[in-house]
Image (spheres, rainbow, N blue to C red):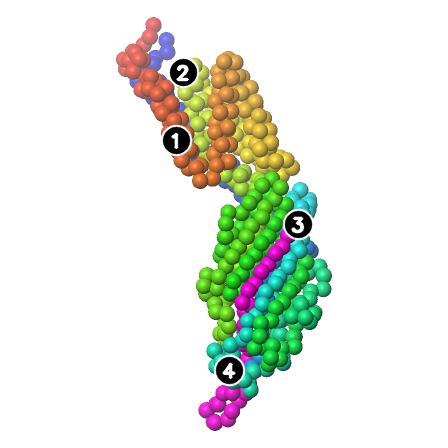
Amino acid sequence: MQVKTQDDSFLHRNRYTIKGVIVGFLILVMLIPSAFIMNLVSERSDRQREVAREVSSKWAGAQTITGPLLVIPYSESIQDKDGKINVFEKFAYFLPEHLTINGKLQPEIRHRSIFNIAVYKSDITIQGDFTPLNIAKLNIAKADFHADRAFICMGIDDFRGIEEQLNIKWNDSNYTFNAGVPDNAVIANGVNTGINLTDDAIAKTNSFTIQLRIRGSERLSFTPVGKTTEVHFSSPWINPSFDGSFLPLTTPVVTDKGFTADWKIQHLNRNYPQSWKNEKYDIAASDFGITLLQPVDSYAKTMRSVKYAILFIALTFGLYFFVEILQKTSVHPVQYVLIGLALSIFYTLLLSISEYVRFNIAYAIATTATVLLITLYTKSLFGKWKIALLFGGLLAMLYSFIFILIQLQDGALLFGSIGLFILIAIIMYYSRKIDWYGRSVIPVKENVALS
């Protein structure tokens, strides 16, 4: 007859512990495909950004409108160590007293491969005035001041976006802008035009108007160069982001028909003066504007979903482990691995389908396919529809819970923590009656033959 040794009894009593260790190890192993899936999501997201840059390179990139600025050359005499007088030409900068910008932004969706890129066209009216110039404040002698060679500069990031000839109405005269700026100490990229500025004009207020039709991609921003800068913008885009150094003056109106937003910035809100010479100021650091957000960033949501992969795998394996104990049915480690792979493939389904349809629809399709697959597999393992349907229902609830967390922003951590606490409490409650050490097993005497 077969003899049951004490070692056999030890393995029998600790079989749950041994199986638990194996299941825990498999959970860690299944994190490997999760890491590969995260890399896949990052690659697809990078591909989308690459396509966006490609479209922008042919359409026009993000645009920042700066100005206009009044720039006037002056002569500065400097004596060197040998006593020789050297005369250098430098520039004095003057900013508008009032600057008013009104515009409409018309968005468009450009399709490249399977990706959608947000671009826009805009009609902008820029109006304002320069008050009498205080040359003495800058310590420039009138004889050294060359108002006859003054010019107007305006910063534009991407010239490809300019759709029409750009002109400025200066008082009653019209001037045409040319590409480039004579001095790039303040504006690195822009347009300029010379103006007829007489001594009489310096002593009075000069008004200006600029009509600008420009296109760009994703973002449109402005630099508040006026002593008082007021901006009003409207657009049919329903997913705007208002960013930069300044937010709108009041809460923007955003409806299903578009948005309107207003800004008002005073010169005290920024860190550069209304006029200066011989200094450099990074005026672009004070820009503000509008970013056209995509209605659904499927890659960001998919990445957030993948971060919960360990939760899915651990809870699913744990539930299988408990059912295995309660039903006294043995599930092979390879079968655990197959279940883990099915849970991992959920994310590749979600990623690939969400590139063609809305994220919510893709999530529903991937969830339905995964829950159905694992439910049928559970039926084949345990042979009972009751267990399979119960398991499928719990898995569907878990996917629904994760979907809610993905939609949340600020409250995701709070609700996620509460949900996990409840799940752990349920597991602890139902695991309390399991005989982990096999105390109910009748001890077997060492080296006793059973007849």
Q: Nearer the viewer, residue 360 or 48?
A: 360
Magenta region, residue range: 75-104
**Is 371 left, or right, of 114 in this rendering?**
left
- Residue 325 seen by the camera: yes
Up-down relation of residue 12 to residue 110 (above or below): above
Residue 17 numbered mark, or none: none
Helix, strand or loop at disc 2? Answer: helix
Residue drawn at 53 percent across, 50 percent down: 242
Name which residue type carries label 1.
Ile
Residue under the image location 50 percent in, 49 percent down: 250
Q: Residue 418 carries which label?
A: 1
Instruction: Report if residue 147 lies within the magenta region.
Output: no
In reply to whether residue 76 is colored magenta, the answer given is yes
Q: Name the residue under label 3.
A: 106
> Which of disc 3 and disc 1 is earlier in sequence?
3
Three-letter code for the amino acid on which mark 4 is drawn: Ile
Which numbered disc covers residue 326? 2
Instruction: Give the amino acid type for the residue marked by disc 3 in the picture.
Output: Gln
Compared across the picture, whether 106 is left or right of 224 comes to right
Q: How many C-alpha atoms fall within 10 Å of the one at disc 2: few (<14), some, or many (≥20)?
A: few
Q: Residue at x 34, y 5 (%)?
A: 451
